[in-house]
Every structure is written in C-alpha cells, then in structure tokens.
Amino acid sequence: MPTFSSDALTNWIAEIFQACAVPRDAALVVAEHLVDAEACGVSSHGVIRVPQYLRAIAEKRVIPDARLTVVREHAATAVLDGGHGFGQVMARAAMDVAIERAKQAGVGAVTLRNCGHTGRLGSYPEQATRAGMAGLIMSNTGGNGQWVAPFGGLAGRLSTNPISIAVPSESGNPLLMDFATSIAPEGRVRTLQVAGRPLPPGWIVNHRGEPSTNPDDLYGPPRGAILPLGGHKGFGLAMLVDALAGGLSGAGCCVSTDQPMDGKTDGAFLLAIHVEDFCPPAEFRSAVARLMAHVKSSPPAPGVAEVVVPGELEFRTRAERLQSGIPVADATWDLLRESARRAGVAEL
C-alpha cells in the first residue's frame, strides 16, 4: 500500500484534473477535498472518486469551469445554482455565502442545486466552525442514485441522503457528526467492491430482498439495495433530508424510479449560525468542551479502549496521516494510475 504526503498527492490529483480541462483553482479545491477525506480515514469519499469525476467530465455531467450564481436572496437566505460544476467547489462557496449571511442576520440558510457530488459533507460544517460558527449541511442527489430501500421495502427508493453538523469547541477540534441516513454510504460499498472484500452483514439485500455480504449484489443486474440506518429512524430522516435538500433547493426529490444511478446532480441545504448572536462565543465553546469531556469520562464498556466523541477519530487520523503520510489502498492506487495514464500525467 503506497503512502504519500498530503501536498504531493493533492498536487498530483489536481494535475490529473487540469489535464482534463479543469481550471487550476477548481482542480485544487476538488483535490484538496478528496485528499483531506483520505487523511480523515473516509476513503469512501476520498481519492477513489477521481475516476468517477473524470467520467462525469467526459460525459458532460460536470462542467469544470462553472460558476456559482444566485437565483434569489434575502437578508438571511439564498437559493444558489451550481451550474453543474464540481460539488466540492460549489458547496464550499455556498457555505461561504451562508457564513456571510449569518454575520449580518445571525443565521444564514442557503440551498444549492445543480452541482456534482458534494463529497465528504463534514468538510462544510467544519468550514463554518473555522469562522467561529456552528454549521449544518444535508444533501440529496436530486432524485438520482436511489440505492436505499425504505423501511419494510425491498427496492431502492431513496438516496443515502447524508447530514453533517458541527459546533466549535475550545478543545481544538469541533464536535462534528457526519453520517449517511443509510446503514453505509454507497461509496463505502464501492470501496470494498474495488478491494475485493465482503461487506459486513446487515448492510445490503440482493434483488430478492435476501441479506448479502457480496457488494456485487448491490450493483447487479438486477440491483439490490442498501438498508436504512436504524430501520424506521434512518428511513424517516432520509425522507426529510430529501425534502429539505431536494425540495427547498429545486434540485428535486426521489419521485420516480426512472432516474440514473450515477447521474448525480446534488441538492443541498446549508445553515450557518452566528454563535455570538446567541451567547458569548467563549462561553459556548467552553460549554461544548465540557460536554465532550463529561461524555468521555464514562468508563468504557468491556472490550472498548476509550469513549470517543463525534469527529474525534477522524481528526486524530488526520493529524497522524498529515505527519506520517496518507496510505492509498492498492486497488485504489491502480485506478489512480490508470486515470493518470489516460490523462497523460506522469505517475506520482
């Protein structure tokens, strides 16, 4: 398994995108996002996505030089259109808009439509915390990518519809939660399929509704389905994410099975909260830090080394990998080498 520094891997992936007519600024945003996901240990949303994004460019589902536009706006809100650009570029810019609205109005609520795969959602609420704010994002796929069966159903009717929330803390890293409303992201299934490894039991069912650990049973044909997180609870949350991210933005919700599985046009709902308008920021950060310390003070259960709070493992992994290097799975590395070869870029 090869290991690379964050800077070297980022610059190489940006070079691959640039060789495929992506402007330098957009190429760097996407590469930084993918490598940071890899650094955090979220390989399902890391560099394995490079071939997927290059296909989207070739099929003109992503417009590399698209610019964010404002459809309508008010003091605390905005409806934004990504022009079918990269999701990472557009979602980062959309959170910037939400942050600016929050500075003026206390909260900034923004919707985003017509953009590619937004990637690891935790990146965007973390962006808000760097501005001293609390942040939230939820995302759907505009009615596409219906991998997830409803509670009590057998066939896919919903996307994995993730949500992420973060709040600042004086402990150094924010308290951050980032999860799909399905039991696993589709990208995690894809990562294990590429690696030739079985899935944990309880993730998917095949087209007959039978439990399976074979990732090929999800993709078919005929297709199986991913199960919702926590049964009816994840299923209900997924529907509400679809309504807010897809309905409010105009990206669209899951209303027809006649939709592409990989034709992703994400919709998103983003929220930034100006902590200072509610309470003194230092007081809030201290309260969050004390909450985290209190939760971590619980004696660990048998077989558990320690109690960790949301985001802690990802931030710990990031710190370690930024120092020692970012490992890339062998199967993923083979895909990246092939992408570089096709783009005419020398191997890293």
Image (cartoon, rainbow, N blue to C red):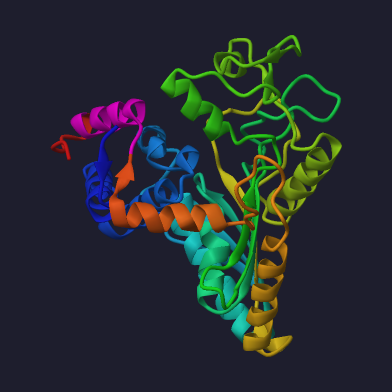
Left-right relation of 158 to 340 = right
Above or below, 112 against 3 in this view is below
The quadrant in which the N terminus is found is top left
Q: Residue at x 36, y 52 (%)?
A: 321
Which residues are drawn in magenta? Answer: 328-341
In this view, the residue in front, 234 or 103, is 234
Q: Residue at x 35, y 36 (%)?
A: 54
Left-right relation of 257 to 172 = right
Q: Residue at x 60, y 76 (%)?
A: 133
Left-right relation of 27 to 68 = left
The quadrant in which the C terminus is found is top left
> Predominant secondary structure in magenta?
helix
Residue 296: which quarter of the image? bottom right
Residue 169: which quarter of the image? bottom right
x, y (%) of residue 12?
Answer: 22, 46
Q: Residue at x 28, y 26 (%)?
A: 334
x, y (%) of residue 327?
Answer: 33, 40
x, y (%) of residue 172?
Answer: 51, 73
